[in-house]
Image (spheres, grey):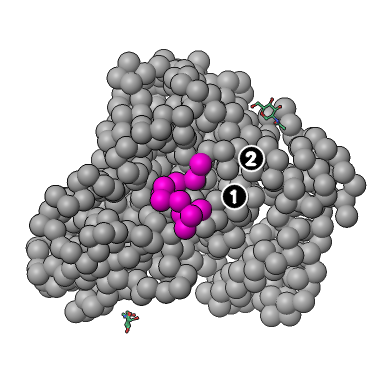
Amino acid sequence: MLFRNRFVLLLALAALLAFVSLSLQFCECVAGLAGPGGGTDAAFVHASAQPLTQTAPPPGFGVLKAEGSTQRTFWEVDHVELLVLDEEARGERSEHAERQDKPRQLGGSGAGEELGPRLLLFEVGSWHLQLQLFVGPPEGQRDGPLLGDNQTVCFSLAGHAPHHFKLVSVHVFIRHGDRYPLYVIPKTKRPEIDCTLVANRKPYHPKLEAFVSHMSKGPGASFESPLHSLPLYPSHQLCEMGELTQTGVVQHLQNGQLLRDVYLKKHKLLPSDWSTKQLHLETTGKSRTLQSGLALLYGFLPDFDWKKIYFRHQPSALFCSGSCYCPLRNQYLEKEQRRQYLLRLKNMQLERTYEEMARIVDTSSKQLRAANPIDAMLCLFCHNVSFPCTRNGCVNMEHFKVIKRHQIEDERERQEKKLYLGYALLGAHPILNQTVGRMRRAAEGRKEELFALSSAHDVTLAPILSALGLTEARFPRFAARLIFELWQDREKPGEHSVRILYDGVDVTFHTSFCQDHHKRSPKPMCPLENFVRFVKRDMFVALGSGSTNYYDACHREGS
Ligand SMILES: *[C@@H]1O[C@H](CO)[C@@H](O)[C@H](O)[C@H]1NC(C)=O
Ligand SMILES: *[C@@H]1O[C@H](CO)[C@@H](O)[C@H](O)[C@H]1NC(C)=O
Ligand SMILES: *[C@@H]1O[C@H](CO)[C@@H](O)[C@H](O)[C@H]1NC(C)=O
């Protein structure tokens, strides 16, 4: 096989379809909620290559677009075939293709008819991928993400490396899964969303019942105080505020399974007699983060044994442990909040929208704004619950869009003004420093903390993404995952490299410390030293204050 001795087919096919992101405009919505469009006519969607542009993504990045279905209906992916050609083999076809039947994340079994699959050539940096996506008609009660017209399929390139690289350790940061809102829209009825876990409700995961039964037997000794007092899975018929939903649990069971296929089955990250020491698990003190972490582990671990699970508690959403005190970080945050406030004042349409919504629900616009209605509206939207109506009218999609547009505008200005970057660099340092510490120990050959999981929030992931320089990264959706993989080059055992993946997309060469590295080096990864240098020193240089360490940087007078 022409690629066998080169960049061998390490594309983790089991992980291929990480999720089908609904290309609704509001992508933090969960996959799988669009609902089947019905229809059983045989037809197929073919995937077409993303046009090649100058902004071609680095190796390992891929997006497929579906187009050309004969009718506006949703189709389920039946199986995927993929082959990778290395650079020299560009353009040649190989007979060989790896095939993944019914990618597990899609759930259910389907008799997807194969209908003249079309080939597509898909360029990712220096690699060519050919990918065939077979889709068939949905069955009546099928669960799981579906592919529709022009929806984007994002697939995971986790665990993808040339064959002479050995996976050493993996460090995963997740945002909790889909949850009930944190605030209600004032003076409206709480949305009726059921947070119990039930098999005959969508979205479903084959491990859901086993998860519940296992959790209901869970001993409290597996957690650092005060985590024991938290419920291990969501269970309220009317969700409590901020409670994880079934969707949220399923998202993390899926994440776990995906990571298991790649890191355990394929790369044998954990020895067969793995123990507590090999895992580093930490979570904030919210039930939704603990439960998300448990669901992920339940999908991930071959045998979920309570005796081997120990979750540490992180009181701060920045996971800053003993290094939380940082006055300059707070100054940046205050300035950033001031910027946000001023931008909002300038947006007359937003102001009018809040006033109109306030009139509808009969409250003051100040109160309404304070209740952060977009959070509640997003939840209603994702759960297909209609927006509230009163005799004064209805809150509607237009309101939602105005607020959402403002958020996007805010995000754009935030990037530009760089105040948030200052906050992010200081805020993300402690957690990145801990990660670097773990990576270095693993690189030295210590067999501990091979898999680290930090179950966290958007306010944890967003600063990390900013600090890494991933300016184009999307705001962390529910169940977002950011992964650092540490690899060892078997041909040069002293050399270790890092790959960084955000929601399955390889973003290594988008980071500020490894930008364009792949253009200078044939290695499809970033040297560990680059990452270490960044965390130990360059992060502070980027602040421009002349500091070279965290303590110093935190105690400088702000500019
Ligand atoms: C959303 O709700 C409407 C009515 O409330 C229903 O007709 C529709 O089928 C629902 N869609 C999905 C995907 O569940
Ligand atoms: C899908 O995309 C193609 C090309 O961008 C476009 O021509 C077509 O109208 C789109 N189909 C739908 C249903 O939006
Ligand atoms: C960074 O990690 C090192 C150990 O790896 C530790 O000694 C140091 O205190 C940490 N610094 C911060 C600011 O957390």
For the record, the magenta segment spans 517-527
In the depicted view, which residue is nearer to us: 492 or 314?
492
Residue at x 35% of width, y 25% of height: 270
Q: Residue 513 carries which label?
A: 1
- At a point 70% along the width and 67% down the height, the residue shown is 416
Proximity of marks 1 and 2: CB atoms separated by less than 8 Å: yes
The quadrant of the image that shows the C terminus is: bottom right
Amino acid type indicated by mark 1: Phe
Q: Position of residue 118 (x, y in %)?
A: 16, 70
Is 501 above or below relative to 365?
A: above
Asked whether, in this view, residue 200 is left or right of residue 170, the answer is left
From the top left corner, tell me how far across and down residue 78 is, in percent.
Answer: 17, 57
289 or 480: which is nearer to us? 480
Residue found at x 31% / y 33% = 267
Say which mark, if any, is on residue 544.
none
Q: Which residue is drawn at 44% across and 27% down?
A: 450
Residue 192 visible in image:
no
Instruction: Determine the image quadrant of residue 94.
Output: bottom left
Label 1: which secondary element: loop
Residue 163 placement (x, y as % from top left): 29, 40
Residue 156 visible somewhere in the drawing: yes
- Sequence-first disc among 1 and 2: 1
Is residue 73 depicted above or below 216 in this figure?
A: below
- Residue under circle 2? 533
Question: Looking at this view, is 168 or 228 the one in front?
Answer: 168
